Image (cartoon, coloured by chain):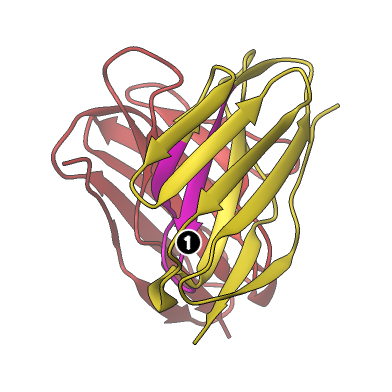
Chain colours: A yellow, B red
Amino acid sequence: GQNIDQPTEMTATEGAIVQINCTYQTSGFNGLFWYQQHAGEAPTFLSYNVLDGLEEKGRFSSFLSRSKGYSYLLLKELQMKDSASYLCAMVNSGTYKYIFGTGTRLKVLA
Amino acid sequence: GAVVSQHPSWVICKSGTSVKIECRSLDFQATTMFWYRQFPKQSLMLMATSNEGSKATYEQGVEKDKFLINHASLTLSTLTVTSAHPEDSSFYICSARGASGSPTDTQYFGPGTRLTVL
């Protein structure tokens, strides 16, 4: 079967670094996306990993280990506006559909 | 680039009426559009995949006669919730994938439509 799991909530302080983990199980894997979603808004694209390793984009980085079924999103120099839900989504290699995790609600405190 | 719009952004309707939601890709051609539903504090659940010029493919448990999808052009897909009931109240989000040919091309999401059925 397919399963994707991430923590429900996390809290961090402005200026700090936070790591949001995502683990998945699937019979066919073709990449993993991270999206940011503010309440009541649509998700916005953050990153895509299909090969093992770290992808860096400014304050955000995403890591993938296919052998471990594991990814994380790293947010540096946290800002208040980073308070949002972060969704990981794996791409099924058979259907190419996105399977979303439940999302991690991140609260950034002053 | 890669902007997707949805209309309306919110709608309130009476039980038993039908509601149409439009999804448009504004600056690219979308061969495939997806419709998701999201309940409060839950993740996005794929309802159906829509390819331009062909019938939509519905996920298990989604009634195709209740959620009518039309993808008449490369920039427009519509979702009609027929005979809406309070349990259909949700946040409906569409996404669009470009026409470059790769199935793993990024999906770009519309801003969502908040449907409340009284």
- The stretch in magenta equals A31-47
Q: Which residue is mark 1?
A: A37
Q: Tell me the chief SS of the magenta region.
A: strand
**In the image, is residue B40 above or below residue A64?**
below
Identify the residue at horizontal 17%, vertical 33% (top origin): B28
At label 1, which amino acid type do we have?
Answer: Gln
Question: Where's the N terminus of chain A, which quadrant?
Answer: top right
Identify the residue at horizontal 39%, vertical 31% (top origin): B106
Chain ID, mark 1:
A
Q: Is residue B66 visible?
A: no
Quadrant in the picture for residue A69: top right
Identify the residue at horizontal 46%, vertical 72% (top origin): A15
Q: Is residue A92 visible?
A: yes
> In the image, residue B118 lies at what x, y percent?
58, 86
**In the image, is residue B7 above or below residue A94?**
below
Q: Residue B62 or A15: which is nearer the viewer?
A: A15
Q: Is residue A107 left or right of residue B7?
A: right
Q: Is residue B5 left or right of residue B38?
A: left
Quadrant in the picture for residue B51: top left
Identify the residue at horizontal 56%, vertical 46% (top origin): A73
Q: Residue B8 or B45: which is nearer the viewer?
A: B45
> In the image, residue B85 lies at what x, y percent?
64, 72
